[in-house]
Amino acid sequence: MELAKKLPWALPVFLLFCFAIDYGVEASHKLYTSLQSLSAVNVNQIHRTGFHFQSEKNWINGPMYYNGFYHLFYQYNPNGAVWGNIVWAHSISKDLINWKKLEPAIFPSKKFDKYGCWSGSATVLPGNKPIILYTGVVDENMTEVQNYAVPADYSDPYLRKWIKPDNNPLIVADLSVNSTAFRDPTTAWLGRDGNWKILVGSRRKHRGIAYLYTSRDFKIWVKTKHPLHSSAKTGNWECPDFFPVSLHGTNGLDASVMEENNIKHVLKVSLDRTRYDYYTLGTYYPEKDRYIPDKNMVDGLRGLRYDHGNFYASKSFFDPIKKRRILWAWSNESDTVGEDVEKGWAGIQADVEVTFSFHFLDKAEKYDSSWDEYDAQKLCSQKGSTVQGGVGPFGILTLASEDLKEYTPVFFRIFKAKFKHVVLMCSDASSSSLSEGLYKPSFAGFVDVDLTDKKLSLRTLIDHSVVESFGGGGKTCITSRVYPTLAMYENAHLHAFNNGTETIIIEKLDAWSINSPRIN
Ligand SMILES: *[C@@H]1O[C@H](CO)[C@@H](O)[C@H](O)[C@H]1NC(C)=O
Ligand SMILES: *[C@@H]1O[C@H](CO)[C@@H](O)[C@H](O)[C@H]1NC(C)=O
Ligand SMILES: *[C@@H]1O[C@H](CO)[C@@H](O)[C@H](O)[C@H]1NC(C)=O
Ligand SMILES: *[C@@H]1O[C@H](CO)[C@@H](O)[C@H](O)[C@H]1NC(C)=O
């Protein structure tokens, strides 16, 4: 409870927080016949997260709130022994922190989902009736259709049993649609015309597409003449998410809110090509069922990101109790460490918040005008925490071993561009572990923040193998997965550092330790 309250906003315009969810096995929308017949490998216990939700194995789905409980559905391969047995596992929580695991909600059993029950979303229909839309895989060629499931008993607050009615599938790809890239139906919203609407992610050649389907009764669905939106050279769009955000308040909004003068819409897509989530803010024209990103938005691979690190296939939902929109995402394991490091990680879960300040920016290094968002990661790998600068690099060293053989620095570096200062934020895993062969990227993003008051804040949640950071009050988020071998137990240290020539003052430093909640 406390933890949820403390998490900051991730985007300036709407209430949202970055929760990472962790998976034991690489998640992707591909059918690996060979893998399907293998047992999923157990997540190494030492890398198990404490307060970030983690399923025992495999990957994830759509969340919702119903009658006192938050429901989280996630993709799970219970034994890996049977071809195409990806199910929708199901956990519930009263506070989004402690979770109780239930029986799987949906599993392959019918012609319309024989080869897998893939991602989708929940919608709560009028009369407080939840319904799930999900992608079913119908053959070995990965032909995808959209199905639905409803609770067997609405009076069960846990919603343990779900029924997949015989009139499935609801939507099959017509000839204009690539049926092997046709998945992840969104939460439905209700138009003023009385029609329900959903998006389904797809591609045509290299163009990413969000197809729009409408329905009066949630049974018969018709594809609109034009997709809601599409963008050239972005490849397959997965897990689209489309929702309104308030222009004047900080509360989240239900997907069906349509007050043109008070809202903007966010369209988020997960690009299979880069394995990152991108979004634009723009205007939704309900009569035409078109979405037009705002002029200054970059629509594609150089676009805005929720998180610049290990973060993919996010899904949001509106929490009607606290009037907030909550975002979930995957943060995949990239560990290949064997059992030789089977130690405990107790006692290194922390939440650290630091406010840095400085008197002058004159020493800021020059910003090259040819750099853009895309270059942030390159800059961070070139100018790591050890490369001396003017204003910065300064920040914190997380999960640092005594001898500093292992450490994961999260830091800023301030540059001077022609008319303004540019803040680079890095979460650098390159020295995070002595283990060889791990994925240790130096993730990075620019922080769009006003430096007039000469202050910059950083908040970092350290949860075993997750280092999740919020720069400038959450304007830029970076999630890293790291697997130290030394920086464990009492040998996991936290330091603040400054490797620039300008003096940096720590105005405020708060650190909390976090208790382990019950997760499944
Ligand atoms: C899958 O694709 C192959 C090659 O195009 C085709 O021969 C086969 O009939 C397809 N299988 C199904 C179940 O459609
Ligand atoms: C259809 O989608 C699949 C999977 O993304 C892709 O391999 C194939 O090239 C696509 N076909 C066309 C015509 O775009
Ligand atoms: C997961 O980890 C691998 C490295 O092992 C990385 O290359 C990949 O892009 C990551 N992200 C996703 C969303 O799959
Ligand atoms: C700061 O720079 C020095 C010299 O390059 C280096 O030895 C030290 O490790 C750096 N500090 C951090 C935190 O990277």
Image (tube, helix red, strand yellow):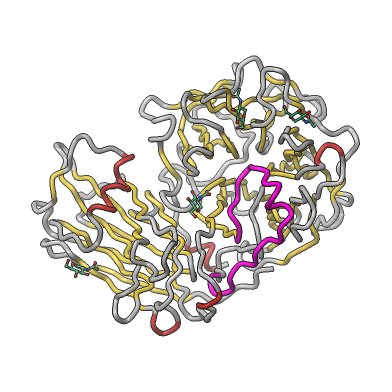
Q: Main secondary structure of the magenta part?
A: loop
Q: Quadrant of residue 31?
A: top right
Quadrant of residue 99 in the image?
bottom right
Give residue 293's position: percent from left, percent from top. Answer: 45, 26
Indicate which quadrant contains ligand 1: top right
Tag count? 0
Q: Position of residue 33 (x, y in %)?
A: 71, 47
Front-lying residue, 154 or 378:
378
Residue at left offset 48%, top offset 60%? 7
Looking at this view, is 326 or 79 the one in front?
79
Tell me the residue at 73%/25% (across/down). 173
Q: Residue furthest right?
A: 166
Picture layout, residue 38 above or below residue 366:
below
Q: Quadrant of the C terminus?
A: bottom right
* Start-end of magenta stretch: 24-47
Residue 265 falls left or right of residue 93: left
Residue 21 location, x and y as percent?
Answer: 57, 58
Left or right relative to 411: residue 115: right
Q: Is-magenta flag for residue 189?
A: no
Residue 213: x percent and y percent?
69, 25
- Vertical placement of 284 versus 317: above or below? above
Question: Which residue does the image show at 65% across and 64% down from the upper left?
Answer: 41
Q: Quadrant of the N terminus?
A: bottom right
Q: What residue occupies the far left of the structure in this picture? A: 362
> Within the magenta stretch, is there residue 41?
yes
Where 387 sits versus 199, above or below? below
